[in-house]
Image (tube, rainbow, N blue to C red):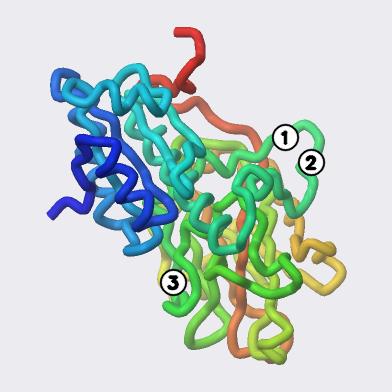
Amino acid sequence: MSKAISISSTEQLNSVFRSASIVVANVFSTSSESSETLSSIFESFSNSLSEPGKISFVKIDFDKNGDLARGHGVTKAPSFIIFRNGKVRDKVQSTNPVELQKFVGKIAQESVALEAGMDSDAASEWRGANVPRGYTDITDQVEIRDCEVLNADDEAGTVRTLFEFSKPSALNNGKSTAKDWVQSGSDDQLLLFIPFQATVKLHTIQLTSLPSSDDEGDVSRPHVLHIFTNRPQNMDFAEADDSEPTQVVNLGPSDWNEEGTANITLRFVKFQKTSTVIIYVQQGDGEADAVRLDRVRLIGEAGAKREMGNLQKIGDDE
């Protein structure tokens, strides 16, 4: 059953604003084939991401309620809007399913910023370490919906939080105010599978890890990592232990900067044609029972994306 609410009046939309801090709207048209396709994807997102009292999804038929849509700056369908506390935070126009999936990242960013009491615009500017000269942050090339992490503690955040561009909440006065990190469960090992939307050249992996002082040594940063490339799916721990990694990394206290981020420089020649990467945290630092990751950034050169349409900011020249 769809969790997206059909909106036909300003009063009804205002009622949803009062019930949820973040509201995501799909402005659709039944006369547009691409709009129909994107609406089905939007419905799946609404079913998985809706949170009572926090995130609600709504849909507005542009053909029947065009004045309502235009009142929020939308001039055509399909369009998508993120509201926070009743105010427009972002709006885009797209016929590209891949770009709609990226838009979900902005929803998560708003959610994390709300939990942390931050403005999402300021949060989006955070970077744990500088990008090496000549390369760019290609984290947006990650196919987030197909990422997977094994041995994650259910009490922490989900795998998609690792790829947020917002400042980790743990950097706000040293205390985490949102579950925007991933932590291992039964021991100090994690297996993180990261697929890309296209083949990339991977130069650097930036890991941010911010164990809380309240953990009293029970949770640590990664120490020994095995990195694998071009695996079609995630490995299990036995396979990861028995397989030859593309690169082995040992991180010590001096590798982490003041923002809790470590720059892992890869053997670039071995990462020239990378479609997937697996980060296997084989061992945490010290004798801790668990290991923690707050953010993962991928640095390198993006490959050519599949041609599936274009994303255009509303108001841009057409």
Q: Residue 271, how many percent across, how many down? A: 61, 44
Q: Residue furthest front?
A: 11
- Outermost residue to the top: 318
The residue tagged 3 is 150
Q: Nearer the viewer, residue 182 or 271?
A: 182
Residue 270 can be seen, yes or no:
no
Task: Out of 242 and 123, give the one closest to the viewer.
Answer: 123
234 relative to 7 in the view: left or right? right
Distance from the alpha carbon under mark 3 to that under mark 2? 30 Å
Picture residue at 29% right of the left edge, 57% below the top? 48
Is residue 307 shown left or right of residue 163?
left
Label 3, label 1: how far apart the Cα atoms are = 30 Å
SS type, badge 2:
loop
| Residue at point 83%, 62% (across, down) | 257
Mark 3 nearby-residue class (10 Å; few <14, some 14–19, many ≥20)? some
Q: Are discs 2 and 1 less than 8 Å apart at CB? A: yes
Q: Quadrant of residue 8?
A: top left
- Quarter of the image where one finds residue 268: top right
Looking at the image, do the residues carrying marks 3 and 1 touch, with CB atoms under 8 Å apart? Answer: no
Decide: few, some or many residues near mark 2? Use Cα within 10 Å; few <14, some 14-19, many ≥20.
Answer: some
Residue 304 is situated, as x and y percent measured from the top left of the image, at: 50, 25
Which amino acid, by three-letter code, is at mark 2? Pro
Amino acid marked by disc 1: Tyr
Q: Which residue is mark 1?
A: 135
Tell which circle, 3 or 1, labels the residue nearer the N-terminal end.
1
> In front here: 130 or 168?
168
